[in-house]
Image (cartoon, helix red, strand yellow):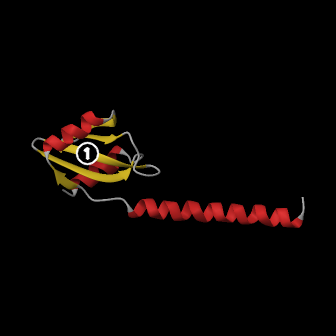
Amino acid sequence: MSLKAKNLIKNIKLYSEQWDDYFSEYTKSLITQPKEIDVERWGDMLEILPPSRWSHIGQWDVFHISERLTGNLVSWYAKSNDKAYTFDNLASISKAEIFEILQTI
């Protein structure tokens, strides 16, 4: 392999690593805090697409929309009694992390 080809491969790899870092930071910048929504909106989102990770966490019924906003970022929905909330976060967050987020409400 020529020196020119080796340098090109090295630059592509470096660019790929930089892109991964950039996209990770970009995704983190899109994470939001819970905001209150109507209980009807929560129900609409439950029925619009198949819910993912639908579960009961503490006093909360929680799920996220199966469609990604970007990368691994999704819209989460939580409801307890007559209060409902939404927030954007990673689809891969743990139940403990979800519970911690909902404790801030």
Q: How many marks?
A: 1
Can residue 34 be seen from the camera position used here?
Answer: yes
Apparent side of residue 66 relative to residue 19 in the rendered image (left or right): left
The residue sitting at 58% across, 62% down in the picture is: 19
Q: Is residue 70 above or below residue 5?
A: above
Along the viewing direction, whichever of 58 and 61 lies nearer the viewer: 61
Apparent side of residue 53 relative to residue 42 in the rendered image (left or right): right
Q: Which x, y percent locates residue 3?
A: 88, 66
The residue sitting at 11% across, 41% down in the picture is: 81
Apparent side of residue 88 relative to residue 26 in the rendered image (left or right): left
The residue sitting at 65% across, 64% down in the picture is: 15
**Mark 1: secondary structure:** strand
**Residue 77 appears in which quarter of the rendering?**
top left
Q: Which x, y percent locates residue 69?
A: 39, 50
Q: Is residue 28 above or below residue 74?
A: below
> Label 1 sits on what residue type?
Tyr
Along the viewing direction, whichever of 10 and 95 lies nearer the viewer: 10
Which residue in the protein does label 1 denote?
77
Q: Which quadrant does the N terminus fall into?
A: bottom right
The residue carrying pointer 1 sits among few (fewer than 14), some (14 to 19) or many (20 or more) residues within 10 Å by Cα, namely many
Apparent side of residue 91 relative to residue 19 in the rendered image (left or right): left
Q: Which x, y percent locates residue 98?
A: 31, 49
Q: Which quadrant does the C terminus fall into?
A: bottom left
Along the viewing direction, whichever of 69 and 91 lies nearer the viewer: 69
**Residue 103 appears in which quarter of the rendering?**
bottom left
Can residue 60 be seen from the camera position used here?
Answer: no
